[in-house]
Image: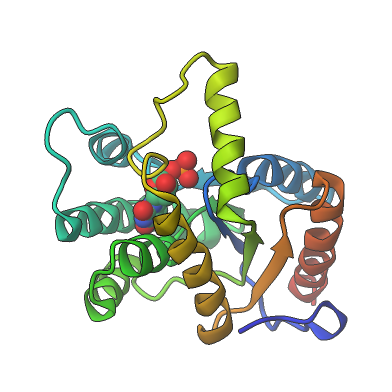
Amino acid sequence: MLINLENFSPSRPRGFLVLEGVNGAGKSTLLTKLSERLAQNGKSVVCSREPGATELGKTLRSLILEPKGDKAAPIAELMLFGADRADHVAKVIQPNLQSGRWVISDRYLYSSIAFQGFGRQLPMQAVEAVNTLATSGVLPDLVILLDLDPAEGLRRTQSRSQASAKLGEGDAFEKEALAFHTRIRDGFLKIAASRPEPFLVVDASQSQQDVFSTVWRAVEALLRASAV
Ligand code: TMP
């Protein structure tokens, strides 16, 4: 469900935020700024990500993103992301929310719908089934979707690789063709409009400061609602 900043009135937020978007959209920068600002507002914040938030997740992350030999079959890839998510929910997300901390996750179940469903074109029922098992019904108070032309996203990830002298060494997904990333961008927009969770869609071609100001208005509404 797309939210409107003028009348976003969340009820009983637990403090769970998810950042999503095509590769290169600026999620990491936003995550750092958000966690700093939330901490200034007196919140304990846990910054997390998928895949790779737990010990098992770190192993899964390198298996999926840096495969040594053959690439995993698409359905196997979906289940590896599902295993990572189940471990993440059980060991990081649930316990921290229960202890009153805020959790910000860089990617969550929506990435499986966008990448494995729309990108790899796996049956949506299969993606939904894995997501349902993995999340145990733990859903965010707000999903922030950084929307960006995937060609610009790929340019940004390639210039990052160049800066670290790793050109051509992008992960398994960054090496996919532009058509794949275009399906993902369009998929994310469809997910934002059709899922019941609140989605804030932000134009990520704006300056980092403008992106942050828009996002912060929505997060302030969550802070206000969590204080009542
Ligand atoms: P990132 O941590 O740099 O965003 O890399 C994770 C990559 O894995 C990114 O290309 C998106 C992809 N991915 C999926 O395909 N499905 C998923 O469920 C998740 C969480 C990530």
Viewer-proximal residue, 67 or 133?
67
Residue 3: horizontal and vertical position, in percent?
Answer: 72, 81
Say which quarter of the image contains residue 17: bottom right
Residue drawn at point x = 51 percent, y = 13 percent = 165
**Rendered position, 121 above or below 206:** below
Q: Is residue 201 above or below residue 101?
A: below
Does residue 15 appear anywhere in the picture? no
Name which residue lies at 65% across and 58% down.
146
Q: Nearer the viewer, residue 103 or 68?
A: 68
- The quadrant in which residue 131 appears is bottom left
Query: In this rendering, would 111 be left or right of 32?
Result: left
Tally the numbered discs.
0
Using the image as rendered, state which of residue 186 and residue 109 is in the foreground: 186
Q: Nearer the viewer, residue 61 or 92?
A: 61
Position of residue 21 measured from the top left corner of the image (x, y, whole percent): 56, 57
The chosen color scheme is rainbow
Residue 83 placement (x, y as % from top left): 24, 54
Where is residue 26, by image quadrant? top right
> Residue drawn at (22%, 53%), measured in percent from left and top?
77
At horizontal 30% and vertical 76% (from top left) the residue drawn is: 128
Q: Quadrant of the C terminus?
A: bottom right
* Outermost residue, top side: 165
Question: Relative to residue 172, is residue 10 drawn left or right?
Answer: right
Would you say 177 lies left or right of 66 here? right
Q: Is residue 54 visible?
A: yes
Give coordinates of residue 1: x percent, y percent. 61, 84
